[in-house]
Image (cartoon, rainbow, N blue to C red):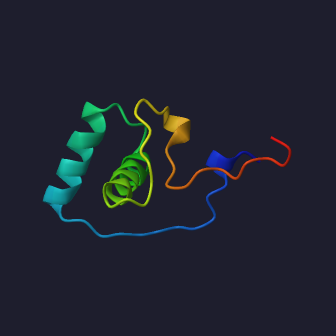
Amino acid sequence: MSYENNRGERLQIMLTEDELRILDDWRFSRRMPSRAAAVRELLTRGLAADGFLKSDVGARSKDYGVSEAPEAEGA
C-alpha cells in the first residue's frame, strides 16, 4: 500500500458557509483535487510558516500530505 493511500486517521471539522466558500475558492484557483487535499496543503503551509515543516512548491496532488513518507531502509 502506498503512503498517500495510507491515511488511517479521520479528522472532522465544522466550517461556516463563508469558510467553506473561501476554502473552495482557494482550492479551485490552485486546481486542487479535493477539499481534503486543500486542507492538508493549508495545514502544511501553516505549520511550515511556524517552522515545523517545509512546504514543497509545485507538489503534485498525490504529494499532498502533512508529513513525509518514511524512507525505505537502505535508500
- Label count reads 0
Q: Position of residue 11 (x, y in %)?
A: 46, 69
Which quadrant does the C terminus fall into?
A: top right
Q: 72 or 14, which is in the foreground?
A: 72
Task: Answer with left or right where residue 53 lies relative to residue 19.
Answer: right
Q: 58 or 14, which is in the foreground?
A: 58
Quarter where residue 53 is shown: bottom left
Q: 10 or 48, which is in the foreground?
A: 48
Residue placed at 40% from the left, 33% from the top? 57
Whether residue 64 is situated above or below residue 9 in the rendered picture: above
Whether residue 33 is situated above or below residue 9 in the rendered picture: above
Q: Position of residue 14 (x, y in %)?
A: 30, 70
Q: Residue furthest right?
A: 74
Task: Answer with left or right where residue 50 lies relative to residue 26.
Answer: right
Q: Position of residue 21 (x, y in %)?
A: 18, 50
Task: Answer with left or right where residue 42 lies relative to residue 40.
Answer: left
Quarter where residue 19 is shown: bottom left
Q: Position of residue 54 (x, y in %)?
A: 44, 48
Residue placed at 67% from the left, 55% from the top? 6
Q: 54 or 69, which is in the foreground?
A: 54
Residue placed at 68% from the left, 49% from the top? 3
